[in-house]
Image (cartoon, rainbow, N blue to C red):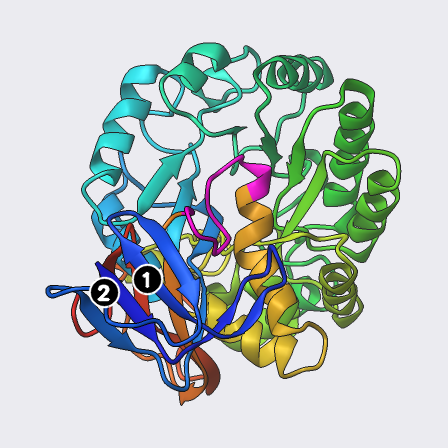
Amino acid sequence: MLLIQNGYLLDPKSGREGNYDVLTDGEKIVKIGEKLSFPRAGCEIIDAEGLLVAPGLVDVHVHFRDPGFTGKEDIMTGARAAAKGGFTTVVMMANTNPAVDTPKVLQQMLEKGRRTGIHVLACGNVTRGMKGHELAPMKELAGAGAVGFTDDGVPLLEERIVQSAMEEAVKLDMPLSFHEEDPALIENNGINRGRASAHFGIGGSPREAEISLIERDLKLALLTGASVNIQHISTREGVELVRKAKKQGSNIHAEATPHHFTLTEEAVIRYGAMAKMNPPLREEEDRQEIIRGLADGTIDIIATDHAPHTAEEKEKPLTEAPSGIIGLETSLALGITELVDGGYLTLKQLLHRMSTAPAAMYHLDAGYLKEGGPADLVLIDTAAEWIPREYVSKASNTPFTGWKLKGRAVKTICGGRVVWGEEA
């Protein structure tokens, strides 16, 4: 048993908040109340004085590079980075090698995930080999444990395939997540076509590459009734398209990353490949519209798109270096620093976007605090100031190294066990 005393509880799902103790037994919360008494000998006591007690965070967009690219990250190190960041549940993307288009590959990944101490889940691919021409065996993948479907990293270009995938996903009652960039419009991806591309003298990625595919997929989602997630949205026009679509259908979701609500293309000029990602960082007006979308619920999910790369890869010339940054260890702090302290979101809204909403989209039993619910919690020091310098991830490719941030996970508890903190 575990008793968390003297903390300030905040449950974004029910809205419940206040000075409550939490008692867990095994993998479940058995009691939430004021000044709970010591239950019995052998119960571990955690004093959460001055800390926020919240549901374990849920990240539905991570790349753990396993199988195929474990020099960058693997499931064990990725899960450790997640636990440090306050996450108790993560959903791995399927752009691995081999791709997650067979139950065998999926089950091998999930088996590794079960040894990490947190809930490591995975999507299956939408298409075989991520080639975009033939649907993967979605029903078989669902039966093997996939929680959703995506070819993230490779946009789906054939409309008939997208519609067929949506129709199958409706039958399975499972979500689809889409990477929205039309490569036909892009020259040198990862850099916004605008001030940044002009600075480096390259073509870059125009906003139309994202807008065109978002428009197509929202139309198909409304037609089929599919549950879709527009991943890592980067343009103000894309946010507005989602806003309008949500008024017509309830299964539309969108996610924003901490880097897209914090940085603009100016960061690429300053940090080079460390700020190169797909879709790219864009203009200040785009960043502000992403924040507005998070505030009004148009964008209901914050996800890291944790994308580790080796130092050697990121040291290549800008047009050759891979896109993506790590994010699990800095995501919560960026949300508090940029969104809460910036006056855009309340803590309750931030926690909702980082736990309750992503869990709901994937039909996960997570993202809330309730008697009988999962004993997955994070204890947060919302006032702690710190500077990220070292990471438990294998990778360190992020422009946020050396930034002064506020707020951090002090302890992460998953299934009633401390998986990050002094006792972990």
- The residue beneath circle 2 is 39
**Which residue type does callout 1 highlight?**
Leu
The residue lying at 60 percent from left, 55 percent from top is 13
Q: In which quarter of the image is the C terminus?
A: bottom left
Up-down relation of residue 226 to residue 296 (above or below) = above
Q: How crowded is mark 2: few (under 14 residues within 10 Å), some or many (20 or more)?
A: few
Residue 191 appearing in the image:
yes
Specify start and end residues of the magenta stretch as a single range.
360-373
Number of the front mark, 1 or 2: 2
How many marks the image carries: the answer is 2
Q: How crowded is mark 1: few (under 14 residues within 10 Å), some or many (20 or more)?
A: many
Q: Position of residue 8 (x, y in %)?
A: 47, 77
Q: In which quarter of the image is the N terminus?
A: bottom left
**Which residue type does callout 2 highlight?**
Pro
In the figure, is residue 66 to the left or right of 188? left
Q: Which of 241 and 313 is in front in this view?
A: 241
Magenta-drawn stretch, dominant element (helix, strand or loop):
loop
- The residue beneath circle 1 is 23
Q: Position of residue 30 (x, y in %)?
A: 35, 53
Q: Residue furthest left?
A: 42
The residue lying at 54 percent from left, 12 percent from top is 135
Magenta residue check for 361: yes
Mark 1–mark 2 CB contact (< 8 Å)? yes
Q: In which quarter of the image is residue 173?
A: top right
Up-down relation of residue 356 to residue 182 (above or below) = below
Element marked by disc 2: loop
Q: Which of 164 and 158 is in front in this view?
A: 164
Q: Where is residue 254 in the image (x, y as percent from the top left)?
A: 68, 46
Q: Position of residue 6 (x, y in %)?
A: 38, 80
The residue lying at 42 percent from left, 47 percent from top is 373
Q: In which quarter of the image is residue 70?
A: top left
Q: Nearer the viewer, residue 79 or 276?
A: 79
